[in-house]
Amino acid sequence: MAAVLPASAVAAPARFLVVVDPELEFSDLGALSKQGAVGLLVPDAGPETSEARARAAVASGKVRNSLLGDKPPGPALISLLDAAQTRPALPVIAVGLPRGGTQPNDRRYPIFVQGPRHRGLLTSSSTRIPGLVSVVDVAPTALGREGKLGSTQDDDPPGALRELDRRIREHRDAKTPFLLISFALIIGLALFRRAAVIPAFAAVLLANLFLGITGRTNVWVDLFVVLAFAGASIALARFRPVVHGVLLAGVLGAYLVAMWIDAAWVALSPLGPTQNARFYGLSNLLSTLLLVPAVASAAILGGWAAAAVAALALVTVGGSRFGADGGGVLVLLTGYAILFALTQRPNRRTLLAAAAVLVALVAALALGGGSHVTTAIAGGPAELAEDFWRRLHLSWLRATSGWGVALLVFGGIAALVLLALRERRRLLLAYLAALAVSLLVNDSPNDVIVAGLAGYLVLSTAPGVARRAAERATPAAPEPRARSAPAATQ
């Protein structure tokens, strides 16, 4: 192979030959890890994949959600060699890919990189989870371009990959049971113990984070943990709303710190991203659930504390190193703008608070590292418009993917519209406006509807949280002094 290839192809240290080996299995990673870096490759984006789609994505370094029904865009950047025909010289990237036609995109395939400075587990800026690799990472690595794979040392790479694969499988299986038991608890408390509904909602979010940190995503463990957290939270029901506001702000802070320390803690939690289209940061489901503490704690605490909560929420959701959810930022800004308009009179102090919040957001986007959010912004208005249209298209495809999903989405939208027409409480009006924007800018309408209705139930039943829109935060008028009684005559 070395004899027939151009000299530059084998001599350039930054270039790799890419070999597709359908026979490559997880059992091979033990031996391969002694010669280079290994990982798990996600072959596509979206619910389905195929051999043709996966090969095109490897060659072009680009991927498009399978719901859109076409191959990844762009020309091939690299050529793929067949392992059955030749054994290329080093350095090399060997990948296993799906075989055959359309199939579920729920498997991960071995990838091996043998070359200078690649040892242990492969690392990817696309996934931010050591050992997990996106299909778009192969071409930049082969060409030595920005976005290429790195590696990190590990004492037992095959064991770490087996554990990672287990967590991703259990993460997928645990989502629905976790949601069902959580929402059942919320509904029960909203009916019979309203004072505990906000602490219980905060407990569900903290239980999700706890499971992500501990790495326990087995269904039965998840159910036990969420029941334990919700049960413990009932003790907070007797405290005043301001304590609940601090608790909700603490939830936002906990997610911020967790994503700062280790992106996998939230990414592999039961409510985290799907790991077949989005890998790190916040899923649309989790971002919608966090909308409740974001707007409720700001409304409860008020003043400069509300500005601090808004800054915390925007950084948590939109920061490139944290949630990296550009749609979530627009949702939060909508909610805060409506809440601000209904509760405050514009003055120097409120304008300074708003400016401080925006500065915090810009700093989080600029200093937190690159993400798909910063990439879209850097692309200018044309790329932002294309991204928005793609999200709308995906939303429609997901909403119409089946009768059950369509009934859930369009029935939920009708319910939210009816609630908005009758609603007079300012916090709920701001929340419903934010949900409306979320349905436009995010591409998972079923998740937004389910989480949005649960959040509305919490905010509408919690005592002492929501007030009517007409009740502005203005100083109370001084009470008139009582007239003094006339002096008694002698």
Image (cartoon, grey):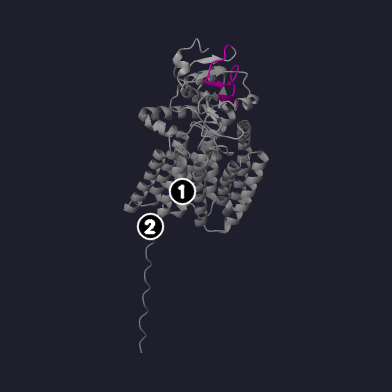
Quarter assignment of residue 100? top right
Picture disc at residue 474: 2
Give how far across and how far down residue 208 sits, in percent.
Answer: 58, 43
Q: Amino acid at mark 1?
A: Leu
Asked whether residue 103 is drawn in magenta, I would say yes
Give how far across and how far down residue 2 sits, in percent.
Answer: 51, 13
Q: Split into 4 quadrants, where in the image is the C terminus? A: bottom left
Alpha carbon distance from label 1 to label 2? 16 Å
Badge 2 marks a residue whose secondary structure is loop
Say whether residue 467 is visible: no
Which residue position is annotated with label 1?
427
Seen at 62% across and 48% down, the residue is: 188
Q: Residue furthest top?
A: 4
Q: Amino acid at mark 2?
A: Thr
**Residue closer to the observer: 243 or 80:** 80
Q: Are marks 1 and 2 in contact (CB under 8 Å)?
A: no
Which region of the structure is painted magenta? Answer: 85-112
> In the figure, 352 relative to 372: above or below?
below
Quarter assignment of residue 207? top right
Badge 1 marks a residue whose secondary structure is helix
